[in-house]
Image (cartoon, grey):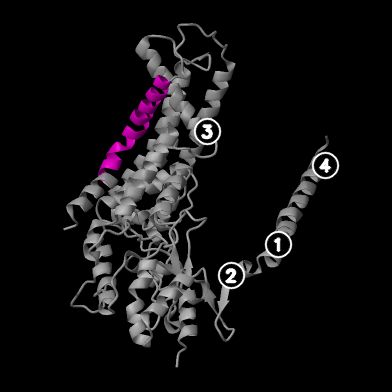
Amino acid sequence: MSFAREASRAVRSTLVLWVLTAIIYPLAMIAFGQLVFPFQANGSIIQNAQGEAVGSILIGQPFTSDRYFNSRPSTTNYSTANPQEDEAGVLKTGVSGASNLAPSNPALLDRIQGKSDPDPEKAIEGDLPRLQQAGVKPTHDLIYTSGSSLDPHISLAGAAAQIDRIAKARGIQPNQLGGLIRQNTDGRFLGIFGEPGVNVLKLNLALDALNPVP
Amino acid sequence: MVLAIYVGFIITTAIGEYQGNPAVNALLGEQAPNLEGKEVRFGWAQSALFATTTTGTMCGAVNSLHDSFMPNGGFVTLSNMFLQIVWGGQGTGTAYLFAYLLLAVFVTGLMVGRTPEFLGRKIEKREVVLASFLILLVHPIAILIPGAIALAFPDQLAGISNPGFHGLSQVIYEYASAAANNGSGFEGLGDSQPSPLAIAGGASSTATALWWNLSTCFSLLAGRYIPITALLLLAESMSRKQPVPLTSGTLRTDTGLFTGITAGIILVMGALTFFPILALGPIAEAFQIARGLG
């Protein structure tokens, strides 16, 4: 076979593959996603009672108020930043990451139990004293940070531990909250893999629906 | 046999994660699984399963951060990448298993004084040299030598983020991951260009990132291409040999005894090469945690 024919065959097969993998396949995937799974394909965005988009069920958000179920601690504060001092561009690009602290690292214990330091810049509040101050019995998910720093869930025990605090802050009956937690629990994958978790954003939206902000 | 090692590794990791960090458990006042670097929906069990599988199979994706695993997890993930046969990568796992089998045949042949044969073909000097040196020795060389260099300059080059024994594990894990074609890491290590997270924390890891990017190249290339070339040479020389007829004097390689010997060879050749690292890294860390951080 001559060089010209070989070269033209190579060019043609490249073009065919390019059309197939760069145009047809992605378009087919977009069409499939939008037709069959439109909710998931658009980021699992959920809306509040007023119809505004408030977040994705898959991405956690920081909740620190006494009136809401609080999320797990996060190394990136759930990819949020102060808009005035956002040098790293967190709000533009988003950020994710874990503490990567080894179990033997004293910094892990400092972060959990807090550390006092004469220099207020260096003092660490600690997740454990913070929870105890808020009257919440510490559970393991509420003191360890997650791998992605965007974990949307807390454990069932972690949610149950916060019931009393929220009931007091909102002046409602604790037993109403137990039902809400059960409704917003995501079970194990296929019934066996992983652990059940309570979706914090969904739970707090349901909480606001039950007991609207005055 | 591989399944047995695999299950044993999963159980080891899972026990460590389930029991959790004793220092933190003391603060909590109860036993709780170690959830640092893990998502609630995965929990301790699935994270342990995935960590064992991903490091064993040269996958490298993670669903939880290996750096924050208990020492049991560090031991298992490192061992997986040192051995490279607990399933191993697509094709390479089997290839490494064959290399170990050849060595097992050779060693047993020496023990009973027969010409070692495998699949009806004689194993001679050339095959043993290829299997032992090129396949089994290149891996430790690609991991331990750059690891030693990095550890000699911990501040300038290594960029270790966790103090003590765990820092050693971090450095060796990075090279093991590179040489074993894995790609996961003990990610606290300053091995990447500064992330937004690092800039926010005021840390700069540019210098160590340069070292890691260049030195792991050596491990990546050596860990892949030298064994591949050696395996091809090995296959070529095996295929050219005249098959020898099976006689009553032939050493059988399909018995339980032989499988046991192969397991022993893997342990001696593969695991003992790296045992000092495991002892100084995860095992020492486990003792440190058991004693209390003090």
Residue A151 appears in the figure: no
Pointer 3 with pointer 4, Cβ within 8 A: no
**On the same chain: label 2 and label 1?**
yes
Q: Which residues are magenta?
A: B256-280
* Residue that label 1 marks: A32
Q: Which residue is mark 2?
A: A43
User: Residue most toward the bottom?
Assistant: A214
Q: Earlier in the sequence, mark 2 or mark 1?
A: 1
| Residues at marks 4 and 2 touching, judged by CB atoms closer than 8 Å | no
Disc 1 crowd rating (10 Å Cα; few below 14, some 14-19, many 20+) is few
Label pair 3/1, CB-CB below 8 angstroms = no
Residue B228's disc is: 3
Check disc 2 and report its element: helix, strand or loop: loop
Q: CA distance from mark 3 to mark 2?
A: 42 Å
Q: Is residue B68 above or below residue A119?
A: above
Q: Residues within 10 Å of mark 2 (few under 14, many from 20)?
A: few
Which amino acid is tagged 2?
Gly
Residue drawn at 41 percent across, 18 percent down: B106
Front residue of A37/B246: it is A37
> For the N terminus of chain B, which image quadrant?
top left
Amino acid type, residue under disc 1 in the picture: Phe
Q: Where A112 falls versus B22 (above or below)? A: below
Residue linked to disc 4? A4
Which secondary structure lies at badge 3? helix
Q: CA distance from mark 2 to mark 1?
A: 15 Å
Q: Amino acid at mark 3?
A: Ile
